Image (tube, coloured by chain):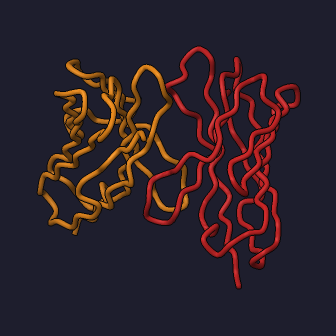
Chain colours: A orange, B red
Amino acid sequence: GAVVSQHPSWVICKSGTSVKIECRSLDFQATTMFWYRQFPKQSLMLMATSNEGSKATYEQGVEKDKFLINHASLTLSTLTVTSAHPEDSSFYICSARDSHQPQHFGDGTRLSIL
Amino acid sequence: KNQVEQSPQSLIILEGKNCTLQCNYTVSPFSNLRWYKQDTGRGPVSLTIMTFSENTKSNRRYTATLDADTKQSSLHITASQLSDSASYICVVSAAYNTDKLIFGTGTRLQVFP
């Protein structure tokens, strides 16, 4: 149980493009979803926390206009990297939880901006 | 400052051997400690979750220990397999915000035949 799915798993796009990443909880209703970014050989860094139906809470230093988060349903959250540039290239990982269990992580999305 | 430190940073062992990874934390007040396995290019997968009152927890060939007094944890892997090659991450939650996970930098384990 507690499966979290991310899509796409890998995306390559040109600089200036906006990219949308989806995170779905497949077998539970996720009251809270989290978005992380991980650079090579580093720990996961929390970008933002989103609760269904409300605005996301961003961590210090994360631009909310750059990383748009939507959590419109209990099973889906999306992260849109707007006008992506090479420095946005990273591994983006979502996690989700309900009120009964801890966070379960998706398999991540490798974003490469050319 | 809440921190989680892991050692060693990297480890190479031969298939079939055992190994132990260490985690020290300064998180307070403590809620729980988790060990995750992260394969290259994949998301973290939970191995064990331990609360204050738990000293040992096993999951197949993985055994985690927790000493809440010294704020130390270990992850012991028995009879290693090639598929154990991955990063192992120690993650601690503070009682005042269990959603804010505090990640260690991980131990990169490589198992060779």
* Residue at the left extreme, as displayed: A17
Q: Residue at x 35, y 44 (%)?
A: A4
Q: Is residue A27 above or below residue B112?
A: above
* Residue at the bottom extreme, as displayed: B113
Q: Is residue A77 above or below residue B59?
A: above
State left or right for residue B42 relative to residue B11: left
* Residue at the right extreme, as displayed: B70
Q: Quadrant of the C terminus of chain A?
A: bottom left
State left or right for residue B37 relative to residue A104: right
Where residue B83 sits in the image (x, y, percent)? Answer: 60, 71
Q: Is residue A72 above or below residue A18?
A: above
State left or right for residue B70 relative to residue A99: right
Q: Looking at the image, which is closer to me, B90 or B79?
A: B79
Q: Looking at the image, which is closer to me, B38 or A45?
A: B38
Where residue A76 sits in the image (x, y, percent)? Answer: 22, 36
Where residue A105 sits in the image (x, y, percent)? Answer: 43, 44
Q: Quadrant of the N terminus of chain A?
A: top left
Q: Is residue B111 above or below residue B42?
A: below
Q: Looking at the image, which is closer to me, A24 or B30?
A: A24
Where residue A19 sits in the image (x, y, percent)? Answer: 16, 52
Q: Looking at the image, which is closer to me, B64 or B40?
A: B64
Quarter of the image for residue A26 reads top left
Quarter of the image for residue A97 reads top left
Q: Residue at x 35, y 26 (%)?
A: A32
Q: How many marks?
A: 0
Quarter of the image for residue B9 reads bottom right
